[in-house]
Amino acid sequence: MRSIIFIMFFFTSGLMLLAQQRANVQPGVISVYQKGLQGIGPDFGNNPASENFYSQMRDKFAAMGIDQKLQLKDIEGSIYVNDKFEPGIIFFKGEEERKLFMRYNAFNDEFEIKNSDLKGERALALFKNKDISCLLGSATFSYMSHMDKKGESAESYLKELLVTGDYRLLEQQKKKFKEGKKAKTSHAVSFPHRFVDEVHYYIQVGEKVPMYAPSKKKELIALLHVGHQESVKKFIKEKGIDIKTQKGLTNVLIFAGNL
């Protein structure tokens, strides 16, 4: 079955559902298509990320005795990697499915899509599925399982930065909310509510699950093929490579991918 489910996106009021195309529903089987229509399941219905965000902030302010309604305009920065909708392509199982305008919401980890870049057109949130990937500009984003910094399994959009030999460098772009702080004295500094960028890198070896790129050299080298580890260790030492940076990781993987 080739299908894509779209969810109508409203940042403050939630989502409305759009049914799949070319759905093939077998009798007696509760398919993804049926779940989408019924509005059940973790990826359907309202937008829990944004709705919970506002309710949590309201509760926190209320507990502090502050009557404040938090709105997007009160927060510095943006939840988007690209604020404007840009031409992109959606792929299903590696094959081009549709050309659309899109932008990446790094706060909710989702792609918002439209048929055009007209302001009056409502945006949709693309259904998260490992068979669906997006090409935005020259970058490919895939919804993937990976092992995060804590060593726990997670799923999110990862941006492909490099493919060399049997290695792949991936980037996770996030937007984190930082609560503002009012100065209590004339000598203190106030900070507004704001969204800040957070970037993590992942290394995929062959068809294995992408692993968080650690900042320690020994742990990073351990992710690579055993036959490459000693050569990479010498390369990092001789070149004085900073593996905490994208440039450093790129150099390491290019070297390893050509061994």
Image (cartoon, rainbow, N blue to C red):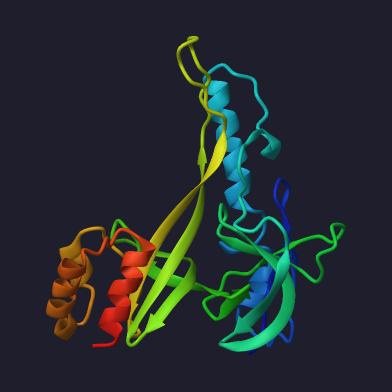
Residue 138 visible in image: yes
Question: Residue reaching furthest right?
Answer: 120
Q: In this rendered view, identify the residue nearer to me: 128 or 105.
A: 105
Q: Quadrant of the C terminus?
A: bottom left
Vertical position of residue 141 compared to residue 205: above or below: above
Q: Position of residue 134 (x, y in %)?
A: 60, 75
Question: In front here: 131 or 234?
Answer: 234
Residue at x 57%, y 29% (from the top left corner):
192
Please name the residue shown 31% across and 66% down the image: 248
The quadrant of the rendering that contains the N terminus is bottom right
Judge from the rendering whether residue 122 lies leftward or rightward of residue 26; answer left or right.
right
The quarter of the picture where residue 231 lies is bottom left
Residue 211 visible? The answer is no
The residue lying at 58 percent from left, 50 percent from top is: 49
User: Where's residue 230, x and y in %?
Assistant: 12, 78
Q: Quadrant of residue 84?
A: bottom right
Side of 86 where 53 appears, left or right: left
Residue 62, position as x, y percentages in the image: 57, 22
Q: Taking 28 as reference, is 236 above or below it?
A: above
